[in-house]
């Protein structure tokens, strides 16, 4: 099971909106609604931002939103803030014996 | 508020084994699904396996099958991952995480650094 493909880096200015793509196959993203997104600041553990493609856990800002089309999921961050500078990972349930697979990770830079 | 507290950093020799613990506080352990994720230095997250405690179901990523053992102990509300035949490539931070919303992980341990050299 190969890692899901994410862009290595995405950048934007404060207040802008950016999107991060996460591309897989019909064995993972394309075949499930169990797609989640995580934010990780340097030296810290991951934080859940989105689950089940579009849902936010309580306490997560509504500036974070998720979507999916075919084999590609996306995370959109609107109203970009300096604290959004972090690494972001997607994750998907898979139909293989390796039940879950993470994306390659995207570093977001706030210009 | 559920907390996951992991054991401390370890330094191991190649070929040895290490067991990392993840103790849970604040909810009924019987209902827990605990996942293990590793992150090598400067690298991304990697799903290793999980245990569904109530049903005693354990799943491993194909890559780690045979190289790790996941267990749990109700009496201490703890989950464990044992890594066998350690190699330098196993140097990483190992996280435990709890499934709260379906197939995602909201509560995370602080991470345990295992260094193999």
Image (spheres, coloured by chain):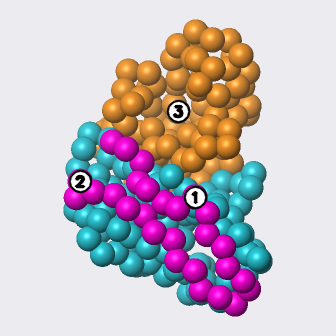
Chain colours: A cyan, B orange
Q: Position of residue B80 (x, y in %)?
A: 52, 33
Look at the image and tell me whether residue A37 can be seen: yes
Q: Which residues are magenta?
A: A1-27
Cα gap from disc 3 to disc 2, whole angstroms: 29 Å
Instruction: Kindly give the residue lying farthest to the top in the view shown.
Output: B15
Name the residue located 52 percent from the left edge and 77 percent from the top edge: A19
Q: Tell me the number on the disc at residue A66.
A: none
By secondary structure, the bulk of the magenta-drawn segment is best described as loop
Q: Position of residue B41 (x, y in %)?
A: 68, 38
Q: Position of residue B100 (x, y in %)?
A: 45, 63
Task: Give the residue at mark 3.
Answer: B80
Task: Give the residue at mark 2.
Answer: A27
Task: Give the residue at mark 1.
Answer: A8
Mark 3: give few (<14), some (14-19) or many (20+) Cα within 10 Å: many
Name the residue located 44 percent from the left edge and 78 percent from the top edge: A66
Q: Position of residue A91 (x, y in %)?
A: 43, 58
**Residue B66 in which image quadrant:** top left
Give the camera-side residue of B87 and B1. Answer: B87
Cα gap from disc 2 to disc 1, whole angstroms: 23 Å
**A59 relative to B52 in the view: left or right:** right
Mark toward the viewer: 2 or 1: 1
Name the residue located 74 percent from the left edge and 55 percent from the top edge: A42
Looking at the rendering, in which quadrant would you find the N terminus of chain A?
A: top left
B60 part of magenta stretch: no
Look at the image and tell me whether residue B53 can be seen: no
């Amino acid at each position: 099971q190969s890692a899901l493909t994410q862009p290595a880096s995405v950048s934007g200015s404060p207040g802008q909106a950016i999107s991060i793509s996460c591309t897989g196959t019909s064995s993972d993203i394309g075949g499930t609604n169990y797609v989640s997104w995580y934010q990780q600041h340097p030296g810290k553990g991951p934080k859940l931002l989105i689950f089940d493609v579009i849902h936010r856990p309580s306490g997560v800002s509504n500036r974070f939103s998720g979507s999916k089309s075919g084999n590609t999921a996306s995370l959109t961050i609107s109203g970009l803030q300096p604290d959004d500078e972090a690494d972001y990972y997607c994750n998907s349930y898979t139909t293989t014996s390796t039940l879950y697979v993470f994306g390659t990770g995207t570093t977001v830079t706030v210009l | 508020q559920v907390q996951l507290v992991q054991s401390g950093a370890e330094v191991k020799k190649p070929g040895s084994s290490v067991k990392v613990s993840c103790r849970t506080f604040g909810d009924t352990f019987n209902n827990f699904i605990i996942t293990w994720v590793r992150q090598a230095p400067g690298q991304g997250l990697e799903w290793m396996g999980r245990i569904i405690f109530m049903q005693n179901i354990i799943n491993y990523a194909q890559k780690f099958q045979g190289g790790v053992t996941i267990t749990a102990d109700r009496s201490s509300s703890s989950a464990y991952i044992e890594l066998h035949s350690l190699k330098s490539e196993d140097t990483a931070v190992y996280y435990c995480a709890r499934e709260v919303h379906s197939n995602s992980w909201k509560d995370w341990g602080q991470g345990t650094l295992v260094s193999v050299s």
